[in-house]
Image (cartoon, helix red, strand yellow):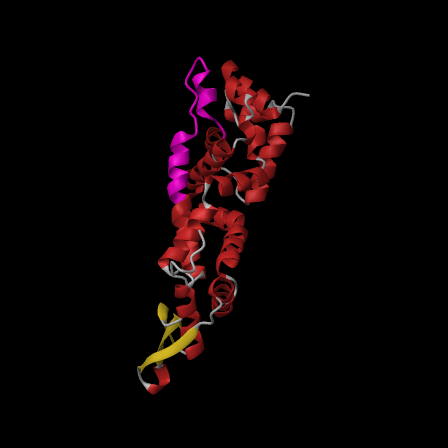
Amino acid sequence: MHDPAQVIELLPRFGYTPRTMIALCGGRVQKYLEELEKTIVYAFADRQLLLQALTHKSFSNEQTEYVPHNERLEFLGDAVLELVISDWVFCHYPDLPEGGLTRIRAEVVSERGLAEIARQLQIGAVLRLGKGEQRSGGCDKPSLLADALEALLGAIYRDGGLTAVSQVIEKAFSAVIKKSALLRYGSDYKTCLQERLQAQYGNLPEYLLVQVSGPDHERIFSIEVYSSGKLLGKGSGSSKKNAEQKAAAVALDHPLLREI
C-alpha cells in the first residue's frame, strides 16, 4: 500500500485540483486531513491553504510547474504563534515577571516543543517532501515538523482569522504551557521559592512588609523578600498573602535562582 505523502505528491503533476487530489488518494489522505481538522477543531474553507502548509520547498523545487510551498505561511505562523502564546501566558500568569513569561514562551515555541506537537497531530504523515528529504527521514525531522506546524497555523490565520487560530493554539499548547510553568515555578510561588532556597543555599526566604497604602477599603500591601540579607524580589497586592506570592514570583526569576 502506498504512503499517502508519496501519493499526494504525484497528483499535481497531472493537473489535479486540491479537492480532486484528496478524493483520489484512496481515502487515506482525505481521512487524515479530516482527522487533522477534527483534532484541531477547525475545518478549512480553502483546502489549498492546508495543502500549501504541508508542502516543503524541496517538493516544490522538483515540480515542472510552480507549486506553492509553506515558507511564507511558516513566516506568518511564527509571528501569530508568538503573539497568541504571549497573550495567553500574560493573562494566565499575572504574578510572573517579564523574564519568567519569556522563558516559558521560549520553551514552548522551541523547535523541540513544536516538533512534539506536530508529531501528536501526525503532520509528518502527509508532508509533501522532495525525494532527498524523503530518503533522509524528513517526515520526522524536528526542524521540518516545527516549520510545518507554524505553516499550518499561518494557514489557519489566513483562512479563518485571529480568533480561529487562537482557539487552535490554545487547544494544542495550553497543556504544555501549564507543564512548563509548573516545572519552573510550581503552583505556589512561595513554596517553590522556599524549596529552591533550601536546596541551593540552605536558607529560608524572609518577607518584609515595607509599605501599606490606599484607603481602608482598598489597601495595597508592598512586600520585599530577602535571603541572607539580599533582596530577591518585590511585590504588591490587595493582601499580604497576595503581595508575598508576587514577590516570590519575582524572586524565582532572580539570577541566584534562575534555572536555564
Say which quarter of the image contains residue 101: bottom left
- What segment carries the magenta color? 54-80
Nearer to me, 92 or 54: 92
- Is residue 57 shown in magenta? yes
Q: In this view, does 98 lie to the left or right of 198?
A: left
For the image, the number of numbered tags is: 0
**Image quarter of the N terminus:** top right
Is residue 15 in view from this perspective? no
Residue at the (43%, 18%) spot, across then down: 61
Rendered view: 248 above or below 176: below
Residue at the (60%, 22%) spot, across then down: 24
Residue at the (57%, 38%) spot, across then down: 119
The percent position of residue 193, horizontal first and vertical second, equals: 47, 66
Rendered view: 196 above or below 110: below
Say which quarter of the image contains residue 29: top right
Question: Residue furthest toward the right?
Answer: 1
Nearer to me, 22 or 94: 94
Rendered view: 124 above or below 238: above
The percent position of residue 130, horizontal first and vertical second, equals: 50, 20
The percent position of residue 88, horizontal first and vertical second, equals: 44, 55
The percent position of residue 140, horizontal first and vertical second, equals: 56, 31
- Is residue 72 shown in magenta? yes
Nearer to me, 137 or 120: 137
Question: Residue furthest toward the bottom?
Answer: 216
Is residue 194 in view from this perspective? yes
Q: In this view, does 258 lie to the left or right of 5?
A: left
Question: Residue furthest toward the top?
Answer: 64
Rendered view: 26 above or below 98: above
